[in-house]
Image (spheres, rainbow, N blue to C red):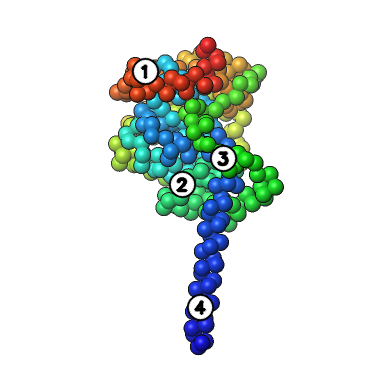
């Protein structure tokens, strides 16, 4: 065997070995990924369920525990899904939305704008995992990893086994048999029943404006363009929050009220409705001490009030159908009966 042929054979063997290792790591990754509500809801809501949604909710934990699709169903017969995940940066929202709109056509897209105030280039490691780990492999996911994850972490998002291999000793049966459909009844919503017990420190009012951080603005423009391209109605929302809890934090803008004044200007310029519940707490009869889980997140009672308000707003402002009398949607009634909110309405 010539030296050239030997080298070629060695290279082929190395490539084959690397391919086998890559396949094994790819196959093992879904087993090792944490089986959380985020995983079940994204996998089921984006890829597995055949349901079509009138409305989809996107954004951070403020939205995740802020709007309950089961309330929209119960009150107005609106089909919807909450795709928000804890700590979801706006650039990740864009890539999730691209995957969602491959399957769900022309929904009203409701975007939580709180994370427009993030000033760091990347989100926190665990928060990025909440969303990116639970996307199916595709070119869109590769772009999300490349653009939303720090360079040194990208390989571990491409092959999640590399960051979860330590779970060898703690794997449980659920890691092998986890059923995404088991959490589908919640339609992506999850809220605490705890009560904050404190009033808002102060309601901040200002006419000042600050610039939307450049990367956030870039991806906001991309989301607006994507919704126009896909013929989706887009609206913005900001959930109740005590800004003193976040203003000036290292990863956020110094003045959220000034930021949302700029967001309101942007919305007006682009003809996008903007519901800022920070300014509507009295209108929804929000009792901050009893309807918040903490300074920044609604609890189940607060989410019911906001969701009930939202149901009315959506029916009044969009051409949506009440599906409650349609037998094809009977499962939505069954899912409501299993939901968190059913307990407070019974």
Q: Which mark is residue 324?
A: 1
Mark 4 lies on a secondary structure that is helix
Q: Is residue 115 visible?
A: no
- Give the residue number, with chain letter if any, for mark 3: 177
Q: Which mark is residue 9?
A: 4
Distance between the Cα atoms at labels 2 and 3?
A: 18 Å
145 in relation to 320, above or below: below
Query: Could you say whether the residue bearing mark 3 is in a helix, strand or loop?
Result: helix
Taking the spot 53% from the left edge, 39% from the top edge, the residue there is: 39
Q: Are marks 2 and 4 in contact (CB under 8 Å)?
A: no
Residue 200, given in percent of the width and then of the height, sits at 60, 21
Residue under circle 2?
136
N-term-proximal mark, 3 vs 1: 3
Where does the image place residue 31, in percent across and percent down from the top left? 58, 46
Disc 2 versus disc 4: nearer the observer: 4
Q: Earlier in the sequence, mark 2 or mark 4?
A: 4
Q: Does 142 appear above or below 191?
A: below
Q: Residue at x 51, y 78 (%)?
A: 9
Q: Quick check: marks 4 and 3 in contact, CB under 8 Å? A: no
* Nearest to viewer (mark 3 / mark 1): 3
Relative height, residue 150 to residue 53 (above, below)? below
Number of numbered markers: 4
């Amino acid at each position: 065997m010539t030296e050239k042929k030997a080298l070629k054979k060695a290279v082929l063997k190395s490539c084959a070995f690397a391919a086998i290792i890559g396949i094994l790591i790819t196959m093992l990754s879904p087993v090792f990924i944490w089986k959380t509500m985020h995983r079940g809801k994204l996998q089921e809501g984006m890829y597995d369920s055949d349901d079509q949604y009138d409305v989809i909710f996107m954004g951070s934990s403020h939205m995740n525990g802020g709007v309950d699709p089961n309330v929209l169903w119960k009150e107005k017969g609106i089909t919807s899904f909450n795709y928000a995940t804890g700590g979801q940066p706006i650039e990740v929202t864009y890539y999730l939305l691209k995957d969602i709109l491959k399957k769900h056509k022309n929904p009203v897209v409701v975007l939580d704008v709180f994370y427009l105030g993030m000033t760091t280039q990347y989100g926190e490691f665990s928060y990025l995992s909440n969303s990116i780990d639970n996307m199916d492999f595709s070119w869109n996911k590769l772009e999300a990893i490349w653009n939303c994850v720090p360079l040194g972490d990208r390989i571990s998002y491409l092959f999640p086994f590399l960051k979860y291999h330590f779970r060898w000793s703690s794997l449980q049966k659920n890691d092998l048999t986890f059923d995404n459909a088991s959490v589908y009844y919640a339609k992506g919503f999850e809220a605490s029943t705890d009560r904050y017990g404190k009033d808002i420190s102060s309601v901040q009012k200002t006419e000042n404006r600050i610039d939307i951080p450049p990367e956030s603005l870039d991806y906001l423009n991309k989301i607006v363009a994507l919704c126009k391209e896909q013929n989706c109605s887009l609206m913005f929302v900001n959930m109740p929050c005590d800004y003193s809890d976040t203003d000036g934090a290292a990863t956020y803008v110094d003045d959220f009220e000034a930021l949302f004044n700029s967001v309101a200007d942007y919305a007006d310029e682009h003809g996008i409705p903007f519901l800022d519940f920070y300014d509507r707490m009295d209108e929804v009869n929000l009792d901050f001490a009893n309807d918040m889980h903490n300074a920044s997140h609604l609890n189940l009672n607060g989410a019911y009030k906001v969701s009930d308000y939202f149901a009315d707003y959506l029916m009044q402002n969009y051409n949506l159908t009440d599906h409650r009398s349609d037998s094809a949607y009977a499962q939505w009634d069954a899912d409501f009966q299993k939901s968190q909110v059913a307990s407070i309405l019974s």
